[in-house]
Amino acid sequence: MSGLFITFEGGEGAGKTTQIRLLKEALEARGKEVLLTREPGGSEGGEMIRPLLVSGHATWDALTEVLLFSAARRDHLIHKIWPALEQGKIILCDRFSDSTMAYQGYGRGDDKQLQKKLTQLYEMIAGNFEPDLTFVLDIDPNIGLKRSCNRSGNTERRFEDMDIAFHQNLRQAFLKIAKEKPERYYVVSAEQSVENIHQEIMKVVDQYVR
Ligand code: TMP
């Protein structure tokens, strides 16, 4: 596949959406074809599954929750991500499989058995496909949650409403995942100004996009 798949990960209120928009504008200004998308969602079927996962307070057990995220992901890969990569586009995706590992595999505790199932399940739906580049926007959850709670009209609070220990676990999980594969992950402090974060991201993207 000739395109480029870039994912953005991190806890709540890290400013991913703003950074993705700025990066899209910068790349389009250079004449690149960019597809902005998100998970859960991104495709028609994925967007149908999204509210089941992010709104309300359904008590899915851990595996059921993961199966729903995976179903949405498979639909997204088939109908949006893979075709866009074939067309040579740059895809900017707001969350992907690392969110599953962090939120579902570590959020409620370091569950090794579940983590193993998550890896197997991912291989089942995506084979050995993975992002070319992943930015982890790192932020103290106390700051991030304050930001995201202040967003007006936010009805997608199912994970935001988890306790602070859950959000601390996520932060450590993202950092751990990033450390294991330093060639693909870039951790950026999201506690800097929007402009500084954007500059840091651009420096890395410049190594991948001519
Ligand atoms: P966001 O679009 O505001 O980041 O919301 C998506 C929510 O879904 C966020 O709380 C993280 C959560 N999530 C998971 O728990 N697992 C996943 O695999 C993905 C993609 C998202």
Image: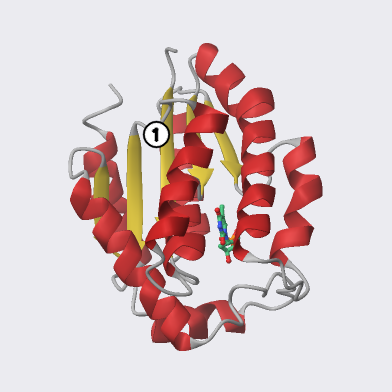
Q: Nearer the viewer, residue 147 or 95?
A: 95
Q: Nearer the viewer, residue 20 or 2?
A: 2
Left or right placement of residue 160 versus residue 145 in this view: right
* Residue hosting label 1: 131
Q: Nearer the viewer, residue 164 or 127?
A: 127
Q: Nearer the viewer, residue 176 or 81?
A: 176
- 70 above or below 131? below
Q: Position of residue 96 (x, y in %)?
A: 50, 46
- 40 above or below 144? above
For the rendered model, the colour scheme is: secondary structure
- Circle 1 Cα neighbour tier, 10 Å, few/some/many (<14 / 14–19 / ≥20): some
Residue 22 makes an appearance in the image: no
Distance from mark 1 CB to nearest ligand 1 atom below 8 Å: no
Q: Position of residue 43 (x, y in %)?
A: 72, 36
Q: Position of residue 80 (x, y in %)?
A: 64, 27
Left or right placement of residue 9 versus residue 38 in this view: left
Give the quadrant of ligand 1: bottom right
**Residue pictured at 45% horizontal, 61% vertical:** 105
Residue 177 makes an appearance in the image: yes
Q: Position of residue 152 (x, y in %)?
A: 69, 78
Q: Which image quarter holds the N terminus?
A: top left
**Residue pictured at 57% horizontal, 31% vertical:** 125
- 12 above or below 48? below
Task: Tell me the element at label 1.
Answer: loop
Amino acid at the residue labelled 1: Pro
Q: How many marks?
A: 1
Q: Residue furthest front?
A: 113
**Residue pictured at 76% horizontal, 72% vertical:** 58
Q: Quadrant of residue 128?
A: top left
Q: Which image quarter holds the C terminus?
A: top left
Left or right placement of residue 168 versus residue 200 in this view: right
- 53 above or below 6? below
